[in-house]
């Protein structure tokens, strides 16, 4: 089982993304998991226009519900898991927005994922510790 990053979910929805084909194929194969926060991040990317995307919020929500959720099991972190992850992040020097990537990786670790699939390899490779899933591109 692979754990999918938000970047993979968004690319699977965007036919103009250079990685669309491989991400859509990976997602549609099913059997993967993602951190529940990835849905909020995906909605933000799809509706915020930051990366040249600007989708109406109702369409973005429907895309997530119909094109992501049937293929991905969502994982959460408990309150205890989150506090431990944040404490650990401070000890590891994780700062700023990297904490969100850190939490994705912590959820993948908790799920005992074999691989963490992302289009942002360097961001996640900087956070990996022994025993973590293999960070790889789709």
Image: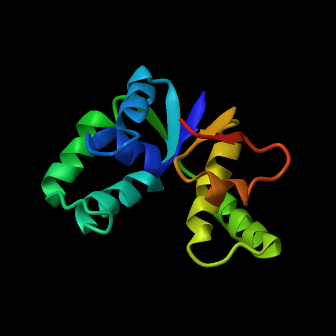
Picture coordinates of residue 112 (x, y %)?
Answer: 70, 36
Q: Is residue 72 left or right of residue 104?
A: left
In the orientation shown, which residue stands out farthest toward the right?
130
Picture coordinates of residue 133 (x, y %)?
Answer: 72, 40
Residue at screen point 73% across, 64% down: 84
In the orientation shown, which residue stands out farthest toward the top?
29
Residue at screen point 37% across, 43% down: 18
Picture coordinates of residue 93 (x, y %)?
Answer: 77, 75
User: Vertical placement of 44 versus 24: above or below?
Assistant: below
Front-most of 52 and 73?
Answer: 52
Quadrant of the rendering where the N terminus is positioned: top right
Q: Is residue 137 left or right of residue 93?
A: left
Picture coordinates of residue 92 (x, y %)?
Answer: 80, 70
Residue 36: tell me if it is visible: no
Residue 18: tell me if it is visible: yes
Q: Is residue 121 left or right of residue 9?
A: right
User: Vertical placement of 83 versus 116: above or below?
Assistant: below
Q: Is residue 94 left or right of residue 65?
A: right
Quadrant for residue 2, please give it. Answer: top right
Residue at screen point 68% across, 61% down: 80
Quadrant for residue 132, please give it. Answer: top right
């Amino acid at each position: 089982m692979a754990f999918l990053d938000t970047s993979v979910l968004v690319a699977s929805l965007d036919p103009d993304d250079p990685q669309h084909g491989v991400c859509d194929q990976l997602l549609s194969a099913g059997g993967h998991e993602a951190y529940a926060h990835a849905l909020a991040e995906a909605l933000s990317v799809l509706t915020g226009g930051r990366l040249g995307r600007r989708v109406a919020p109702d369409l973005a929500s429907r895309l997530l519900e119909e094109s992501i959720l049937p293929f991905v099991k969502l994982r959460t972190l408990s309150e205890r898991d989150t506090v431990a992850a944040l404490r650990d992040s401070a000890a590891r020097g994780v700062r700023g927005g990297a904490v969100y990537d850190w939490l994705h990786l912590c959820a993948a670790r908790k799920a005992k994922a074999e691989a963490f699939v992302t289009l942002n390899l360097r961001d996640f490779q900087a956070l990996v510790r022994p025993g973590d899933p293999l960070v790889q591109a789709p």
